[in-house]
């Protein structure tokens, strides 16, 4: 019965463009979940890109004959590209840490599509002018225009390890308001060109036998990029020796063991005094822990790896109640 229902879900998914159930198409991925390895994907939904566009062109005859005309063109387009993924990451964290709220981390917004970082929203506007001279068998045009391109995209604070996914707790690390979760870009280009056509041009009837065009496009300004401030590093993990060095100026710290054993632990650290601006980061594999100076308040929950501190100026709390 379960097998039949799985086939039914997979069949319905095929009827919805962009909807996938990797856990059904690849049941062996469940083994990774049982082993506690990398999170597995449960559901992926990448709906088709939504595009809205319109163009308007106006032609004004300035002189005839020969026909001299002015063409004015306007264009605007908006593209919206979204993607969502549900995996086991947050569910595992909620169970391991006995924190149901962490289950939200199983839901993620896609920042990359086929390993390419594409904006969530892309707006393009253009204004073009052209002057044409048409004399029966030849038509010469000189044209120019300006194009504006603006993009809005999710800001990924940890692109090296996020797998192109941005999660709720990572967004909260950037700030508590949505304007701190996105990056914006603005580009402006100028283009100039000339075209020559040979054929038959008589009123609305045009037959082109040969044509040549040359266009130059140049940026009017250096592309402007507006990004939220990337979270300051609260600790550094040395890949060679596995030492996690806490940045004391970012304290106080609450570090919790998520998985692993002595010498190869996965540890999550929460740092900062302001509850609205606390930084959360996970490090793995951790063999030892140290600090870059005197540390204030620090709480370790279930951590077994060796720790060396210069000095503890306030409180050091060691909580092993979660260990078995």
Image: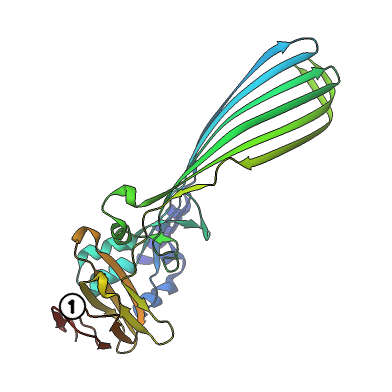
| Mark 1 surroundings within 10 Å by alpha-carbon count, few (fewer than 14), some (14 through 19), many (20 or more) | some
Q: Is residue 5 above or below residue 255?
A: above
Decide if residue 16 is in sight here. no
Q: Quadrant of the N terminus?
A: bottom left
Note whether 292 is above or below 171 in the view shown: below
Residue 104 in the image: state x and y as whole percent.
Answer: 28, 60
Q: Residue at x 37, y 82 (%)?
A: 285
Describe the element under mark 1 as helix, strand or loop.
strand
Q: Quadrant of residue 233?
A: bottom left
Residue situated in front as seen by the camera: 142 or 25: 142
Residue displayed at 52% across by 61% down: 115
Image side of residue 191 versus residue 96, left or right: right
Residue depicted at 38% across the width and 77% down the height: 37
According to the image, what is the colour scheme of the structure?
rainbow
Return the residue at label 1.
Answer: 299
Q: Residue at x 24, y 76 (%)?
A: 255
Q: Position of residue 291 (x, y in %)?
A: 28, 81
Please name whichever residue, 115 or 234, is drawn nearer the observer in this view of the structure. 234
Instruction: Report the front residue among 290 and 75.
Output: 290
Q: Is residue 254 above or below residue 243?
A: above
**139 lies left or right of 222:** right
In the picture, the quarter occupied by the C terminus is: bottom left
Q: Is residue 151 above or below residue 274?
A: above
The percent coordinates of residue 314 (x first, y second) are 13, 78
């Amino acid at each position: 019965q379960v097998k039949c229902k799985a086939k039914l879900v997979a069949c319905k998914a095929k009827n919805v463009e962009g909807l996938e159930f990797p856990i059904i198409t690849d049941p062996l991925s469940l083994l990774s979940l049982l082993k506690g390895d990398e999170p597995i994907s449960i559901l992926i939904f990448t709906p088709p890109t939504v595009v809205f566009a319109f163009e308007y062109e106006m032609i004004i005859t300035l002189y005839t004959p020969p026909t001299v005309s002015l063409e004015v063109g306007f264009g605007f387009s908006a593209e919206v590209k979204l993607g969502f993924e549900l995996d086991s990451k947050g569910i595992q964290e909620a169970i391991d840490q006995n924190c149901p709220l962490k289950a939200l981390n199983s839901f993620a917004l896609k920042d990359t599509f086929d390993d390419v970082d594409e904006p969530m929203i892309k707006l393009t506007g253009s204004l073009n002018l052209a002057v044409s001279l048409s004399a029966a068998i030849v038509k010469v045009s000189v044209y120019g225009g300006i194009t504006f391109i603006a993009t809005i995209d999710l800001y990924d604070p940890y692109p090296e390890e996020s797998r192109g996914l941005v999660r709720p707790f990572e967004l909260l690390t950037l700030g508590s308001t949505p304007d701190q979760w996105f990056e914006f870009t603005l580009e402006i280009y100028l283009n100039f060109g000339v075209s020559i056509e040979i054929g038959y041009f008589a009123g609305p009837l045009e037959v082109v036998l040969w044509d040549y065009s040359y266009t130059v496009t140049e940026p009017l300004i250096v592309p402007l990029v507006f990004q939220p401030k990337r979270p300051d590093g609260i600790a550094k993990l040395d890949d060679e020796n596995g030492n996690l060095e806490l940045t004391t100026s970012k304290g106080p710290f609450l570090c919790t063991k998520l998985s692993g054993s002595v010498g190869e632990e996965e540890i999550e650290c929460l740092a900062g005094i302001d509850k609205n601006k606390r930084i959360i980061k996970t490090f793995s594999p951790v063999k030892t822990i140290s600090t870059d100076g005197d540390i204030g308040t620090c709480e370790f929950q279930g951590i077994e790896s060796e720790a060396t501190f210069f000095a503890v100026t306030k409180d050091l709390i060691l909580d092993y109640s979660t260990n078995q």
